[in-house]
């Protein structure tokens, strides 16, 4: 049908064309509504707690742990949003048996400290805090020990940089070294419920939780 014939058809069938236009608009609205509903259902699905931090967008510095349990670990100090710090700290402290899906990703080195890459840095820690520096120190297991639901992806490295991604299901285990001034947690690898794990990973991969608590650069 040429445009001229189509135009003539519209003029002859004015009311029908209006109905078709409204039907098209209604169809688009329904599709958008269906997408929004599916997204809301996904986010409301029962899942594990999620902590998702991308170092590339965070305010982060690095140090080296010289003594104690995590001696020789590279330490990455990540600045949190002040108003959200207490919520995160309380969730970690008050529910020690809860399982978390944690993803830490980004490009190193930061300062001179690596995760993975040419330095083959397989063990690291992160410190979470704000300018008032009530820190939580979190120590990750060595990357080569992660299997099953838990994984460490070491990207293509150059002499200058390396992209990594660690994800896994963990439980926070509190401990203190002698003379500690900060709360410390070891991450204990756990075997998750498969259905909860799948729903948690689906939420993680929407990136909706990325840097939820973190002060961006």
Image (tube, rainbow, N blue to C red):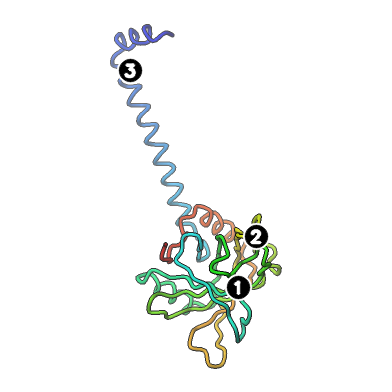
Rendered view: 198 above or below 134: above
Rendered view: 30 above or below 81: above
Q: Label 1 belongs to which residue?
A: 124
Q: Quadrant of residue 166?
A: bottom right
Q: Label 3 belongs to which residue?
A: 17
N-terminal-most mark, 3 or 2: 3
Q: Give the Cα separation between the discs numbered 2 and 1.
A: 20 Å
Relative to the observer, which residue lies in front, 45 or 94? 94
Rendered view: 116 above or below 26: below
Tag count: 3
Relative to the observer, which residue lies in front, 6 or 177? 177
Camera-side mark, 2 or 1:
2
* SS class, disc 2: loop
Other-residue count near label 1 (Cα within 10 Å), few / some / many at <14 / 14–19 / ≥20: many
* SS class, disc 3: helix
In which quadrant of the rendered image does the C terminus lie? Answer: bottom left
N-terminal-most mark, 3 or 1: 3
Other-residue count near label 3 (Cα within 10 Å), few / some / many at <14 / 14–19 / ≥20: some
Residue 191 in the figure: left or right of residue 76: right
Residue 190: x and y in percent read 63, 71
* SS class, disc 1: strand
Which mark is drawn over residue 159?
2
* Residue at 60% in and 83% down: 66
* Residue at 53% in and 65% down: 48
Rendered view: 107 above or below 9: below
Residue 10: x and y in percent read 32, 12
Q: Give the Cα separation between the discs numbered 3 and 1.
A: 65 Å
């Amino acid at each position: 049908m040429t445009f001229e014939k189509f135009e003539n058809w519209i003029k002859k069938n004015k009311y029908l064309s209006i109905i078709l236009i409204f039907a098209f608009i209604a169809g688009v609205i329904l599709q958008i509504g269906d997408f929004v509903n599916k997204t809301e259902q996904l986010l409301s699905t029962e899942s594990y707690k999620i902590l998702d931090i991308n170092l590339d967008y965070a305010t982060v510095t690095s140090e080296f742990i010289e003594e104690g349990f995590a001696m020789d670990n590279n330490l990455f100090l990540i600045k949190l949003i002040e108003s959200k710090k207490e919520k995160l700290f309380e969730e970690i402290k008050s529910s020690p048996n809860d399982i978390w899906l944690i993803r830490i990703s980004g490009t190193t080195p930061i300062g001179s400290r690596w995760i993975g890459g040419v330095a083959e840095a397989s063990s690291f820690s992160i410190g979470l805090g704000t300018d008032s520096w009530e820190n939580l120190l979190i120590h990750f297991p060595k990357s080569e020990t992660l299997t099953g639901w838990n994984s460490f992806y070491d990207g293509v490295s150059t002499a200058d940089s390396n992209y990594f991604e660690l994800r896994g299901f963990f439980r926070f285990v509190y401990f203190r070294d002698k003379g500690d001034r900060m709360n410390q947690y070891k991450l204990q690898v756990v075997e998750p419920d498969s259905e909860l794990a799948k729903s948690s990973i689906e939420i993680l991969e929407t990136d909706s939780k990325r840097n939820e608590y973190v002060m961006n650069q």
